[in-house]
Amino acid sequence: MASSRRRGSGSGGPGGPYAAVDLGTNNCRLLVARPSPRGFRVVEAFSRICRLGEGLEASGRLSEAAMTRTLEALEACAQRMRRRRVARARAVATAACRAADNCTGFVKRVRDRTGLRLEIISSEEEAQLALTGCAPLLSRERSRAIVFDIGGGSTEVTWIALEAAPGGAALDGLEILASVSLPLGVVTFAERFGGRRIKAETYRAMVAEVRAAFAPFEAAHGLGAAIAAGQVQMLGTSGTVTTLAGVHRGLRRYDRRRIDGCRLGFDDLRATVRRVRAMGYEERVGHPCIGQQRADLVIAGCAILEALCTLWPVGELRVADRGLREGILYHLMNGAAVRDWGGRQE
């Protein structure tokens, strides 16, 4: 669609607004923000579970039902962006679109219907953007960090070196030593192993598969030695970790302000995983921090998380309810990849 941007408040100048759209295997998320002295101020957030990757592992293609749900979610994003008079934006797609044979046609449908220019980014860029978004939560007291993101269709792990830079910007002194992205996510696992009722032996098989898949990364980079020396922190960004943090804290409804940046000791994390695994499907549906949309995915997420935490026993997890979208916004506001997003203003 051609752009017919209106002039006026929020329609273009240096003050924003900016928008980031993150289309994953399970979720479609939007964040609209304006620059502020401390980074940016969020003016609108939107998230919808659309399960774009449903059935993808078996067929190699995005299903028509999944594409229809996702197009509706992306249209809702575009409407909010037009209402906010967004002129600078980036919309990215990750694991599901990287894997699907018919992703080119889907991207064209997105452009024709919504005006969004959807970019399919590499797993390396996905990890970099997520790190940019999470960097303010990393402590300079330890020289190494494991940052992971458990997605719907893949799990990314990034191994980072940090220099002591208390007065520096969030990304000053950060170096990515290594990263890996493997096609192990909550949607793919739930489709393979089931999501409603998981037997103990099935759960153990999931944990073992994830550990085995990441073992070569450990062998190549020696994270365990740095952990034994007390040099490593762990930061997780995903629906799995935020959900478990909400369950641990006994929230009656999910509250990002009480979750983003919180810390979970591994003993508490293990106890929370046991509690969630002991719930029946209907109990998970009724839990305010799990709900129907995650009830059949959370056990798969627990298995992936347990594998990472036993492979790398740091002892404490810091929880991030931030990541890719925030990373996109930081890049946009620093002049990288600034673009007219292509949507018509109402």
Image (spheres, rainbow, N blue to C red):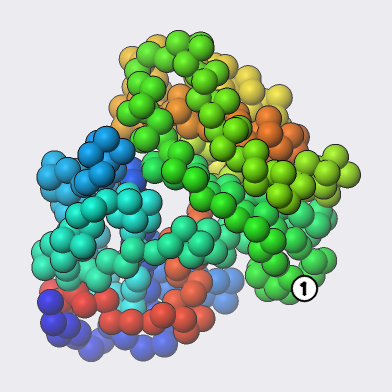
Judge by depth and name the residue closer to the eye, 260 or 272: 272
The x, y position of residue 239, in whole percent, is 46, 40
Residue nearest the viewer, comparing 320 with 156: 156
Q: Which part of the image, by quadrant, shows the C terminus?
A: bottom left
> To which residue does mark 1 refer?
167
Q: Is residue 154 above or below residue 160?
A: above
Give the left or right position of residue 163, taking residue 267 as reference: right
Q: Quadrant of the N terminus?
A: bottom left
Image spot of residue 153 (x, y percent): 39, 43
- Please, is residue 208 above or below residue 106 in the view? above
**Residue 296: where, in percent of width, then height?**
35, 25
Res 161 seen here: yes
Q: Is residue 256 left or right of residue 62?
A: right
| Rendered view: 48 above or below 177 | above
Residue in front for this viewpoint, 7 or 318? 318
> Quadrant of the rendered structure where residue 11 is?
bottom left
Residue at position x 51%, y 81% in the image: 334
Left or right, residue 4 beside residue 256: left
Residue displayed at 57% across by 76% down: 37
For the image, the number of numbered tags is 1
Disc 1 element: loop
Q: Residue at x 35, y 21 (%)?
A: 194
Is 26 displayed left or right of 241 in the figure? left
| Residue 45 seen in this snapshot | no
Residue appearing at x 49%, y 36% in the figure: 240
Q: Which quadrant of the view contains residue 88?
A: bottom left
Instruction: Where is residue 303? Give x, y as percent.
Output: 53, 27
Task: Give the residue type that dot 1 points to.
Answer: Gly
Q: Residues within 10 Å of mark 1 (few under 14, many from 20)?
A: few
